[in-house]
Image: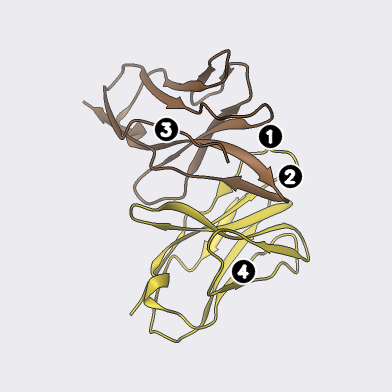
Amino acid sequence: DAKTTQPTSMDCAEGRAANLPCNHSTISGNEYVYWYRQIHSQGPQYIIHGLKNNETNEMASLIITEDRKSSTLILPHATLRDTAVYYCIVRVKIQGAQKLVFGQGTRLTINP
Amino acid sequence: NAGVTQTPKFQVLKTGQSMTLQCAQDMNHEYMSWYRQDPGMGLRLIHYSVGAGITDQGEVPNGYNVSRSTTEDFPLRLLSAAPSQTSVYFCASSYSSVRNNSPLHFGNGTRLTVT
């Protein structure tokens, strides 16, 4: 399984853009990059995913480098409610299993 | 749609007791799975199902059984609870079990304590 590396923690001021990096240097051609977040101990919440093109939805933007070895999740105008642990995950299918290997994630703190 | 619903939210068991954690989804999702989350360990896959009547083991299946008699439901059974099974359990589902371009949707978890 491809693995991901993220910083342990980050801070961002409220109203500013939060840019969360992720390295996935062993990613292979058919593996998507997924981003989830977990607030307190709620269930992980899906944010966005992409293969090789940049993606944007109502929550965030995902920028994937051309070599696909890293990506950045952008929360354009961070609010206090965006304080959470953010997981960058490469998803693969192995023998029928949709395997998501969750690392430790980045603890993002939005400061007023 | 309610999404993925897990019951109960909290449970305390004594060692050796059995119980079933319920998971239901109303999105007609093909794929369902169970994860446990422990401090410092991240989320680990217990069991998964790619459709009704089909189940398979994940990373940490020992001590747990599952069944998938309907598309909607995927209960997780603890036959003889042990303190090592104290954890937060999450159920997750996705539309497709084949396409890896299909996000997983998680329930809000069951917090289980085994004394």
Label 4 crowd bin: few (<14), some (14–19), many (20+), radius 10 Å: many
- Report how far apart the C-alphas of labels 2 and 3 lie in the structure: 27 Å
The chain displayed yellow equals B
- Residue A44 screen position, x and y as percent: 47, 45
Give me the disc on residue B87.
none
Residue carrying label 3: A5
Residue carrying label 1: B101
Q: Residue at x 55, y 58 (%)?
A: B59
Label 3 crowd bin: few (<14), some (14–19), many (20+), radius 10 Å: some
Q: What amino acid type is highlighted by mark number 4? A: Pro
Q: Is residue A104 above or below residue B10?
A: above
Residue carrying label 2: B96
**Residue at the outermost top position:** A66
Q: Quadrant of residue B87?
A: bottom left
Q: Residue at x 53, y 22 (%)?
A: A69
Chain designation of label 2: B
Same subunit, tags 3 and 1:
no
Discs 2, 4 touching: Cβ within 8 Å: no
Residue carrying label 4: B75
Discs 1, 2 touching: Cβ within 8 Å: yes
- Report how far apart the C-alphas of labels 1 and 4 lie in the structure: 25 Å
Q: What amino acid type is highlighted by mark number 1? A: Asn
Same subunit, tags 1 and 4:
yes
**Residue at the outermost front position:** A26
Q: Secondary structure beneath disc 2? A: loop
* Towards the viewer: A108 or A67: A67
Label 1 crowd bin: few (<14), some (14–19), many (20+), radius 10 Å: many
> Which label's residue is closer to the chain start, 1 or 4?
4
Chain A drawn in what color? brown
